[in-house]
Amino acid sequence: MAMTEQIQTTDVVIVGAGMVGLCAALAIARSGLQVTVIEGRSEAHLAAKLQQKPESDKLHQYDNRVSALTRASENIFRNLNAWQSISEYRVCGYTDMRVWDGQGSASIDFSCTQLYQDNLGHIVENSVVVAALLAQCKAQGIKLCCDTQVQAMAEIDESSADNSEQTYNQLVTCQQKNNTEAESAKEQLLKFKTKLVVGADGALSKVRQLATIELYQRDYQHHAIVATVRTTEQNQRTAWQCFTSDGPLAFLPLSNPNLSSIVWSTSADNAKSLMQMSDDEFAKALALNFESRLGEVCEVSTRAVFPLSERRAKDYVKKGVVLIGDAAHTIHPLAGQGVNLGLLDAAELGDVLQLALKRAENIGDITVLKRFERARYSENLKMALAMQGFKTLFDMNNAPVTIARNIGMRLFDRITPVKQHVISEAMGLSGKLPSLANAIS
């Protein structure tokens, strides 16, 4: 097999062209830095969604993987000029959220009217977001190296350089496949000299591994089953979540009023049994555990399942390296906050690097990157601990705990100011936010 080699320079290398990685590319490029994105998948795969005609009535055209985007995330995409493409393709703005204890009778209802807003957020297919961000990256001339895998990272000796100089202190070695028929037997070795490597390559991050950053990991003892389903009753633009005896079950509304995306977090044994069921058997089990709140489940897409773990990098940064999104932290999906935290990481990193440039600082310097870590580590940890607390609380099903839990839920539901504060925080309408997360004035 023929192998060619190229050495290039670029200000920032981002590994991972998912929602968080592409968002970071756009956020960082706003400062005038040259950005290169490395991605293992093909560009055609990433861009495919916006090239299709959206058909809201066809269940199997929807992706299994969706995100509940907060208002802060929406603002980020609006400020990056990606929201129009997302909203023109297919989104569902949800107006209400209903949460109840399947082991009791208490529930909590949230409504956008409590905050005088049009919605609480949007349910969007992940592939729609990726395709829209990719289109913006191409429009802005951000370099994308697809079908490319990172092989190695090494620090370049800069002992003789002034610390304030914008030096290329990292060497990233990648292997790229050439997929054209004429060049099918060739592979190319790409090497990038760069000032900063951004790991946005997911929970099993190669960047984190190569940077030898320690990882804290805890198994949630849950597997998540995802699918798209059709119900006999309409979804009411409401996000529904029931805490069953074996884990939370969520129905997230899609643009077709009779379709929902489900996320069923349950024990590994139960997940295995559910995945082995026929579609009809699964539909009946789903409706039963969901208390038939939306009537019968009459159609189910292909199901997918994946294990759930809390992961937390001991450090988000090293000299010339920073981790964002799932590469730095993963949490239980019961509140749907995972990707929103990652998008805030990307936006915050853009702010930190922009400030560093204004101060003529080296963007790869550890003192610069520590500012990002201080801004995001505690916020992400706070959410992770909250999700663990909710999971633990609803895992306990003895009578005294169930009674106390239901009393607490009823009290919470009646205290409107507290509910307003909680939902405002969850939507990204309060607190200190990165500049991109604020509404366009």
Image (cartoon, grey):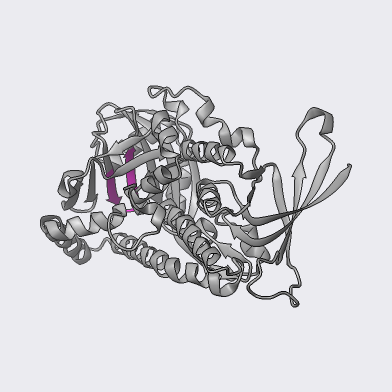
**Between residues 382 and 87, which one lies in front from this camera angle?**
87
Residue at 45% x, 53% y is 343
Please tell me whether the stretch drawn in magenta is mainly helix, strand or loop. Answer: strand
Badge count: 0
280 falls in the magenta region = no
Relative horizontal placement of residue 269, taking residue 431 as reference (left or right): right
**Between residues 424 and 257, which one lies in front from this camera angle?**
424
Q: Say which quarter of the image contains residue 406.
A: bottom left
Q: From this viewpoint, is residue 309 visible?
A: no
Furthest residue in direction right, as rendered: 2
1 relative to 174, above or below = above
Residue 177 percent across, percent down from the top left: 76, 41
State the quadrant of the N terminus.
Answer: top right
Residue at 28% x, 39% y is 94
Residue at 34% x, 60% y is 391
296 relative to 126, above or below = above
242 falls in the magenta region = yes
**Between residues 125 and 20, which one lies in front from this camera angle?**
20
Q: Say which quarter of the image contains residue 402.
A: bottom left
Residue 41 percent across, percent down from the top left: 64, 41
Residue 274 percent across, percent down from the top left: 43, 41
**Between residues 162 and 7, which one lies in front from this camera angle?**
162
Magenta segment, which residues?
240-252
Residue 98 percent across, percent down from the top left: 22, 46
